[in-house]
Image (cartoon, rainbow, N blue to C red):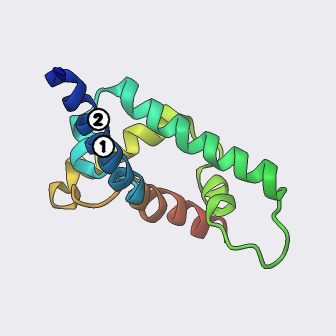
Amino acid sequence: MRIRFTALLTPLILLGMLGFATAVRAELPIVTGKEWMASDNDTKLAFLLGLATMIKVEQNLLGDPPPPGTRSFAPALAKGLAGMSLTEVMQRIDSIYADHPGRRKESVIGVIWRDIAIPRLEAEK
């Protein structure tokens, strides 16, 4: 009885992929300034659209404002970015990373929070 090489190889490949998929699911990727600055504008806007969608979904699930005792930064982030277009947010992030190349290891969401949302929230007070 002859067993084909591909018949043996296929299960090994599937097992390897399953192991890789498990490892990938365990850690969510964080987009940093390095990836941001290497991306084109369409990719950057898609990232921001995904973030905006996540915030909107959370607002719809929790309510706006969320119930007392709810821990989430999404409402504050939404308020801190209110009135800005995705293009404006993208341009601000671009400027921050361009002006401070040493910060390109920082996450994009951290830059949005610390450098855009918080200053705008504090200005409202």
Identify which residue, 84 or 49, lies in the foreground. Answer: 49
Query: Which residue in the protein does label 2 denote?
Result: 11
Question: What distance separates the C-alpha of mark 2 from that of mark 1?
Answer: 6 Å
For disc 2, the neighbor class at 10 Å (few under 14, some 14 to 19, many from 20) is few
Q: Is residue 113 left or right of residue 34?
A: right
Kindly check if marks 2 and 1 are in contact, taking CB atoms under 8 A apart as contact: yes
Q: Is residue 58 left or right of residue 120?
A: right
Q: Is residue 31 visible?
A: no
Across and down, in percent, residue 12 comes to 23, 38
- Residue at the image point whose x is 69% and y is 60% from the top: 75
- Residue at the image point whose x is 29% and y is 47% from the top: 20
Q: Which residue occupies the extreme front position in the image? A: 1
Identify which residue, 6 or 64, lies in the foreground. Answer: 6
Across and down, in percent, residue 86 comes to 52, 35
- Residue at the image point whose x is 65% and y is 53% from the top: 78
Query: Which residue in the protein does label 1 denote?
Result: 15
Q: Quadrant of residue 107?
A: bottom left
Q: Is residue 61 above or below residue 125?
A: above
The quarter in which the N terminus is drawn is top left
User: Circle 1 — which element?
Assistant: helix
Q: Is residue 110 visible?
A: yes
Q: Is residue 57 left or right of residue 35?
A: right
Residue type for callout 1: Leu
For disc 1, the neighbor class at 10 Å (few under 14, some 14 to 19, many from 20) is few
Q: Is residue 82 above or below residue 14?
A: below
Given this view, does label 2 or label 1 mark the residue nearer the observer? 2
Q: Is residue 120 above or below residue 42?
A: below
